Amino acid sequence: MKAKQQRDAAAVRIFPPGVPLLTILAGIGLSRLWPIDLGFTLPTPGRYWVGGLIVAGSILGLGLWPVLLFRGTGQDVNPWKPTPEIVERGPFRITRNPMYLQMVLVCIGVAVILMNFWILILTPVCAWLLQRFAILPEEAYLERKFGDIYLAYKSRVRRWL
């Protein structure tokens, strides 16, 4: 039974939270090897506030809220687990992938906090990796499982924003 459930789940090939973590770590490493001087810097308390608000807002609104919605419907947040239904409430009304969007925004927030231009440069790569190896397999799975219901949802709600 477990093998059938695995076949019926999305074929996600990566551990999604690892992608932004590696993006941030790579940006920190690159900034040590090849620092980029932007010619300006945000004042220390200001950059902590701005970056911190981006990180906290994205974690609460696009990370925690979807997790609570998933748990309320009995779903697992792991993309390789079978999905019993499509959630269309909360942030899922504006983006089909709020948790992945949250991961990208965390990269941006950390880049602001650290004033690390490398993290900012690598963030689109992070988004692409998430889309290619997590989002697209999830969407293919959801189309197979829910058919026209998911296609209608896709036509109403954008992938990112």
Image (cartoon, rainbow, N blue to C red):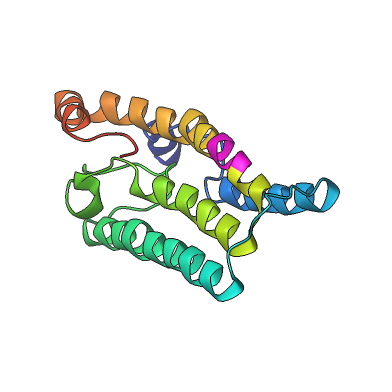
Left or right: residue 112 versus residue 91 is right
Q: Residue furthest bottom?
A: 45
Left or right: residue 17 versus residue 72 is right
Locate residue 141: give its quadrant.
top left
Q: Is residue 67 above or below residue 85?
A: below
Quadrant (top left, top right, bottom left, bottom right) of the N terminus: top left
Quadrant (top left, top right, bottom left, bottom right) of the C terminus: top left
Q: Is residue 125 magenta?
A: yes
Q: Is residue 17 above or below residue 54?
A: above
Q: Residue at x 43, y 67 (%)?
A: 53
Q: What range is drawn magenta here?
A: 121-126
Left or right: residue 23 versus residue 88 is right
Q: Nearer the viewer, residue 104 or 67?
A: 104
Residue 14 point in image, percent of width and height: 56, 39
Residue 138 point in image, percent of width and height: 38, 33
Total numbered labels? 0
Q: Magenta-highlighted stretch: main secondary structure?
A: helix
Q: Nearer the viewer, residue 109 or 153?
A: 109
Q: Is residue 21 above or below residue 125?
A: below
Q: Residue furthest front?
A: 39
Residue 31 point in image, percent of width and height: 76, 51
Q: Residue furthest right?
A: 33
Residue 87 visible to an observer of this rendering: no
Residue 64 visible to an observer of this rendering: yes
Locate residue 143: give its quadrant.
top left
Q: Residue at x 59, y 55 (%)?
A: 111
Residue 71 point in image, percent of width and height: 28, 60
Q: Residue at x 28, y 24 (%)?
A: 144
Q: Is residue 18 above or below residue 154?
A: below
